[in-house]
Amino acid sequence: MKKLWLLLCSFCWLSLSAQEGTGDLIRQGDMLPDFELSSTTYGAVTRAGVKGKVTVISVFATWCGPCQKELAKIEESLWPQFRAEDNLVLLVVGRGHTEREVITYREKKGFSFPIYPDPERKFTAKFSTHIIPRIYLADKNGKIIYISTGYNPEDFKVLMNKVERALKE
């Protein structure tokens, strides 16, 4: 009976999620919204502060399995390849996580890239209402040129190519 109840609850949740769609508030072709992220470790970053730079935004949660895979891929390929680029900003944002939580998580995973907290979801609420991980790529003008939802190795390859192209433009 317990398994049947769990199965029924799961079905209802999936049905509601499908009806809500992707939760996108920002779409490809839109401009980056005004934002501010703040970290005692990495300082503050705003939309004005990334002007003229290619911006990669990765939204994750520490409990999300696909997020773990995506962040590992950022650590092993995107960050090493592009970290020295003066015209690139990587914003990895912990949706619903405090600064203490993202610092602990970063240390536990051994990530070398900065992670910003978003405990009240003020930043991430400007992009989508649900579904993580998400990556947004904005060109030097602040225009969103690529979005991925969930983690897929093929999508990540597309992201890498698009970042490389955007940096050359």
Image (cartoon, grey):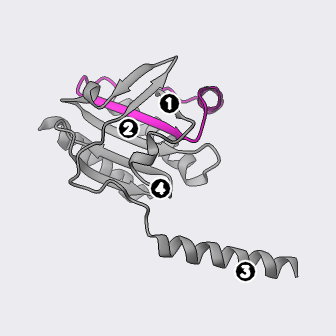
Question: Between tags 3 and 1, which lies in front?
Answer: 3
Q: Nearer the viewer, residue 50 or 135?
A: 50
Image mark for residue 78: 2
The answer to whether mark 4 and mark 3 are in CB contact below 8 A is: no
Q: Quadrant of the N terminus?
A: bottom right
Within the image, what quadrant is residue 109 found in? top right
Q: CA distance from mark 3 to mark 2?
A: 40 Å
The kind of residue on which mark 2 rests is Leu
Question: Could you tell me how far apart the alpha carbons at marks 4 and 1 are, in whole angstroms?
Answer: 20 Å
Q: Position of residue 63 (x, y in %)?
A: 65, 47
Seen in the image, is 67 located left or right of residue 1? left
- The percent position of residue 160, horizontal first and vertical second, equals 31, 45
79 vs 63, nearest the viewer: 63
Residue placed at 47% from the left, 27% from the top? 114
Which amino acid, by three-letter code, is at mark 3? Leu
Q: Quadrant of the image for the C terminus?
A: top left
Look at the numbered discs 3 and 2 and tell me whether their residues touch, using CB distance below 8 Å.
no
Q: Is 42 situated above or below 125?
A: above
Q: Nearer the viewer, mark 3 or mark 2?
A: 3
The residue that label 3 is drawn on is: 8
User: Residue 26 in the image: x percent, y percent?
Assistant: 32, 53
Q: Earlier in the sequence, mark 2 or mark 1?
A: 2
Measured in 3D between alpha carbons, the distance from the residue under mark 4 to the one under mark 3, in whole angstroms, is 24 Å
Tag 1: Cα neighbours inside 10 Å, few (<14), some, or many (≥20)? many
Q: Is residue 98 above or below residue 16?
A: above
Q: What residue range appears in magenta?
A: 83-112
Horizontally, residue 78 falls left or right of residue 98, namely left
| Label number found at residue 129 | 4
Crowding near the residue tagged with mark 4, few <14, some 14–19, many ≥20 C-alpha atoms within 10 Å: some
Using the image, tell me which numbered label, if any, was put on residue 69: none
The residue positioned 57% from the left and 78% from the top of the image is 15
Q: Is residue 105 magenta?
A: yes
